[in-house]
Image (tube, rainbow, N blue to C red):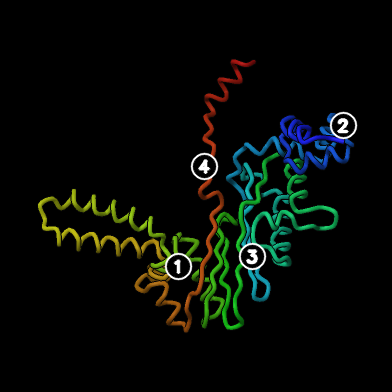
Amino acid sequence: MFKASDVKELREKTGAGMMDCKKALEACEGDMDKAIDWLREKGIAKAAKKESRIAAEGLCQIKAEGNTAVMVEVNSETDFVAKNEEFTGFVDYLVDQILTNDVKTVEDVLTVKDGSETISDKLVALTAKIGEKISFRRFEKVTKNDDEVFGTYKHMGGKIGVIVVVKGANEEIAKDVAMQAAAMNPIALKREDVPAELVEKEKHFITEEVKQQSAGKPEDVIEKMVVGKLEKYYKEVVLVEQAFIKENKMTVAKYVSDNGGEILSMVRFAVGEGIEKKQENFAEEVMSQIQGA
């Protein structure tokens, strides 16, 4: 048959994953050349070579059924592909699979079987067919009780997606909250949810700024100014404390409570956030092509 070193060699030659290389060698009875062809036929070798590319475009999709809602982010290398019907069809398919299967992680989703194929197989085949790196980045599965409602909203054709759960108010109110979160980009639902390291970092910057602007003022005055600016920071980044965009004289929390409700949770995705996008220098690219011609 074949040895572990053969799997390693095949992986180095094709860039395919270890398990795919093992499958290829098993299918080809240890024949290295046939295994390479097997991987190419399946589109796996071609897809694997794209793994080093940066996929920072893409799409958020949301679907709610009963007491469960799902939001996914799938990335592509270009916005053009993110509008491709096969790409959008795969994203819709992915949402449906997550809704109907008991999955907790991206890895769980990728191992879900649909017929003879896993979702990972389908993703590899799509990457090979489209010719760009396609990456299933993340998902969130949100549940609610019968006396609660979902508020869902997609902005810019799916570049931003939000799911909120509201208790005691109707879906229209919940959607208003989701739109608020999409537009104003809060980092947390409540003040206590803001990561402590972010608060400390912001407090440090505020303190330094106040000290420079208020040189010679007593320490207690400076401290009060820091507290005031920190309060302003919370009002900008905490959803329930933000000024409501449709009526900025009240907070989001007040708007919801005036309509008999309370916001219980919020999830917000922005496509590509946190992914370092490749910076193209077209002048250098054209020059390198001219020199290479």
Q: Nearer the viewer, mark 2 or mark 3?
A: 2
Where residue 60 sits in the image (x, y, percent)? 61, 56
Reply above or below: 75 against 288. Answer: below
Q: CA distance from mark 2 to mark 1?
A: 56 Å
Sequence order check: which comes first, mark 4 or mark 3?
Answer: 3
* Amino acid on which the number 2 mark rests in the picture: Asp
Near mark 1 (Cα within 10 A), the count class, few <14, some 14-19 or many ≥20, is many
Where residue 169 sits in the image (x, y, percent)? 52, 81
Q: In this view of the protein, which residue sits in the foreground, 238 or 201?
A: 201
Of the numbered discs in the image, which one, if any, rests on residue 31? 2
Q: Secondary structure at mark 4?
A: loop
Where residue 59 sits in the image (x, y, percent)? 62, 53
* Amino acid on which the number 1 mark rests in the picture: Leu
Disc 4: which residue: 276
Q: CA distance from mark 3 to mark 1?
A: 19 Å
* Amino acid on which the number 4 mark rests in the picture: Glu
Q: Quadrant of residue 203?
A: bottom left
Near mark 2 (Cα within 10 A), the count class, few <14, some 14-19 or many ≥20, is some
Q: CA distance from mark 2 to mark 3?
A: 43 Å
Of the numbered discs in the image, which one, if any, rests on residue 189? 1
Sequence order check: which comes first, mark 2 or mark 4?
Answer: 2
Where residue 95 sits in the image (x, y, percent)? 69, 61
Disc 3: which residue: 70
The reply to whether callout 1 and callout 4 are in contact (CB within 8 Å) is no
* Amino acid on which the number 3 mark rests in the picture: Val
